[in-house]
Amino acid sequence: MAKSLLSVEGLHAYYGKSHILHGISLSVGYGETVTMLGRNGMGKTTTLKSIMGILPSRQGRITFDGHDLMKTPAHRIPRLGIVYVPQGRNVFPELTVVENLLISGSGNHASGNLDVVFEAFPRLKGRERQLAGTLSGGEKQMLAIGRALVLKPKLLVMDEPSEGLSPKLITMVRESLIKIRREQGAGILLVEQNVKLALDVADRVYLIEKGGIKEEDTAAELREKNEVLLRYLGVKV
Ligand SMILES: Nc1ncnc2c1ncn2[C@@H]1O[C@H](COP(=O)(O)OP(=O)(O)OP(=O)(O)O)[C@@H](O)[C@H]1O
Ligand SMILES: [Mg+2]
């Protein structure tokens, strides 16, 4: 098997005494888009926080591009080439749009080309000096994705980018994920509840329930498995 960009093996995670993740294993190949789908409270965000080192109470193996993430302090992980967009479209609210685009999670400044963002998201044009906290929900999501365009990560990790967005903005999210992959060759780990978006962008899909991976399929295979989608997500495509 080809070497993975991100590899998670036997991951367990805890909040205090609550045992939340029960041996999650997943991988993302170089340039591959992988989605984790699951209902509310199943452990999607906990998986991402464990990978990013934000939730230290964990066991297992996590490697990224030759680095052992279990031994890497959380503040160093973005520097390895991961952009993490947390649930709730986090931007730095007290910084302007441009400042958000130029600062990476580790405090390093990017010298990136901002035009690519304003080209992709014309709505952000003319708002360069606006404080990010005052942007609309959809604009914040554009800015969060825009950071990935400027910082050019090896891996983009996104937690439910479609949450609370109109169908039109979900289309915008889909197009930008496809663009980031095609033009930058980035690997993408996307957590979603929106099945259509997940299947449209992903090569492979993991279904998570109660802190465990229940099924792994290619997106093409999963499209044909309505009973699986119904069982784990309560929807058909
Ligand atoms: N800080 C915390 N302390 C205690 N329990 C937590 C904490 N954060 C999450 N949990 C619990 O861990 C479980 C998994 O939560 P998680 O946020 O990973 O779910 P999720 O799959 O991301 O759900 P959603 O789709 O609603 O965002 C839930 O039962 C949740 O209540
Ligand atoms: Mg979540």
Image (tube, rainbow, N blue to C red):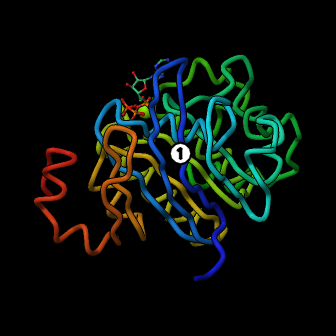
Q: Where is residue 154 in the image (x, y as percent from the top left)?
A: 71, 61
In the image, residue 35 sits, relative to residue 17, either above or below, namely below
User: In the image shown, does 127 or 167 lie closer to the viewer?
Assistant: 167
Looking at the picture, how far across and down is residue 96, in whole percent?
Answer: 73, 26
**Quarter assignment of residue 103:** top right
Please give the name of the residue rendered at 57% of the width and 72% of the height, measured from the top-left corner: 182
Q: Please indicate whether residue 203 sits to the left or right of residue 154 in the image.
A: left
Q: Residue at x 66, y 66 (%)?
A: 5
Q: Quadrant of residue 163?
A: top left
Q: Where is residue 23 in the image (x, y as percent from the top left)?
A: 48, 47
**Where the C terminus falls, by quadrant?**
bottom left
Kind of residue at badge 1 = Met
Task: Determine which residue is flagged by label 1.
Answer: 158
Q: Looking at the rendering, which quadrant does residue 187 occupy?
A: bottom right
Mark 1 C-beta to ligand 2 under 8 Å: no
- Which residue appears at 67% of the width and 40% of the height? 52
> Pointer 1: residues within 10 angstroms few (<14), some, or many (20+)?
many
